[in-house]
Amino acid sequence: MSQKQFAVRIERQDQPSRPPYWQTFVLDYEPGLNVTSVLQRIAANPTTTDGVKVPPVAYESGCLEEVCGSCTMRINGRVRQACSALVDRLLQDDPTGIELRPMSKFPVVRDLCVDRYRLFRALEKLQCWVPVDGYADMGSGPKQSPDQQEQNYPLSQCMSCGCCLEACPQYQEVAIQRRKDESEKDFEQRRDEELDRHFIGAAAMSQAVLMNSNPTGKALATSRIEAMIAPGGIQNCGKAGNCQAVCPKEIPLMHSWGRANRAATIHVVKKFFDG
Ligand code: SF4
Ligand code: SF4
Ligand code: FES
């Protein structure tokens, strides 16, 4: 390997049920590369350091500007987005090369692609949307004060990337396989019921806090709080703060946890006195 080249070590996996394995590729150095462009160059010539031509490495990307979250993976041991991980900086930190692995808390589909369905299921469980009754123009809706906007805008930047879940010690991978004799519909129902018993994680919790503070979204506040304190809910959080430390959007997740816990306490006390 010449000085103008660098190595990229990638943990690969052919199918969800197959064991992972490593392959190393060597690339010519170019200034201004990011990890997604490294993967594009490997796809154009997928030949390992042993000179073996292999299938291109599977990876996801969408926006290429750290907005969609689809390219999230572990890069040199740190979970982050491939599109905003600059090769120059990575090689400054570790001149021996770059190591890419899929996230560990979601089932691997292939190579660096994982299935983040569980994250989206948690958003569904907590009803993280603003309910509207139809497509007709219903006017501008209730206003939010500048203070409310300032408090809630950072939460709206969540891109469901999963970094906070990857870093969370309370969030473990749950792999649910379809049984041989099971219909697609039965499998989906069983999968959702099982996922709903596991920890929701910081991303969905913070979105529920955001929706509960929206003047229109708060119509569903009670059922969101009920879902937040159901099995797998906010009581599972250990409050260590790893989630906030790794969030690429610097979302104040610990503040959201505080808001969620306060709302849950008020809800439980109120329910007690209301009988
Ligand atoms: S809260 Fe942050 S780390 Fe978690 S999914 Fe949203 S953007 Fe990603
Ligand atoms: S504060 Fe809660 S959600 Fe965040 S990393 Fe710790 S246990 Fe996980
Ligand atoms: S491609 Fe969208 S965040 Fe990287």
Image (cartoon, rainbow, N blue to C red):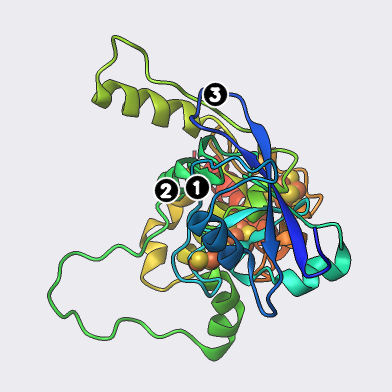
Mark 1 → mark 3, Cα distance in angstroms: 17 Å
- Mark 3 lies on a secondary structure that is loop
Mark 3 → mark 2, Cα distance in angstroms: 40 Å
Q: Residue at (64%, 43%) from the top-left corner?
A: 51
| Corner quadrant of residue 130 | bottom left
What amino acid does circle 2 point to? Ser
**Looking at the image, which is closer to me, 124 or 117?**
117
Mark 1 → mark 2, Cα distance in angstroms: 46 Å
Q: Residue at (36%, 62%) from the top-left corner?
A: 219
Q: Mark 1 points at which residue?
A: 56
**Which is nearer the N-term, disc 1 or disc 3?**
3
Q: Name the residue under label 3.
A: 18
Give percent across and percent down for residue 154.
Answer: 59, 75
| Residues under numbered marks 3 and 2 in contact, where contact means CB atoms less than 8 Å apart | no
Give percent across and percent down for residue 54.
Answer: 53, 41
Q: Residue at (66%, 54%) from the top-left corner?
A: 164
Give percent across and percent down for residue 132.
Answer: 25, 66
Q: Name the residue under label 2.
A: 223
* Quadrant in which the N terminus is drawn: bottom right
Question: Is residue 164 in view?
Answer: yes
**In this rendering, is residue 266 above or below 190?**
below
- Mark 1 lies on a secondary structure that is loop
Q: Residue furthest left?
A: 136
**Which is nearer the N-term, disc 3 or disc 2?**
3
| Residues under numbered marks 1 and 2 in contact, where contact means CB atoms less than 8 Å apart | no
**In this rendering, is residue 247 above or below 105?**
below
What amino acid does circle 1 point to? Pro
Mark 1 burial class by Cα count in 10 Å: few <14, some 14-19, many 20+: some
**Looking at the image, which is closer to me, 43 or 133?**
43
**Which is nearer the N-term, disc 1 or disc 2?**
1
What amino acid does circle 3 point to? Arg
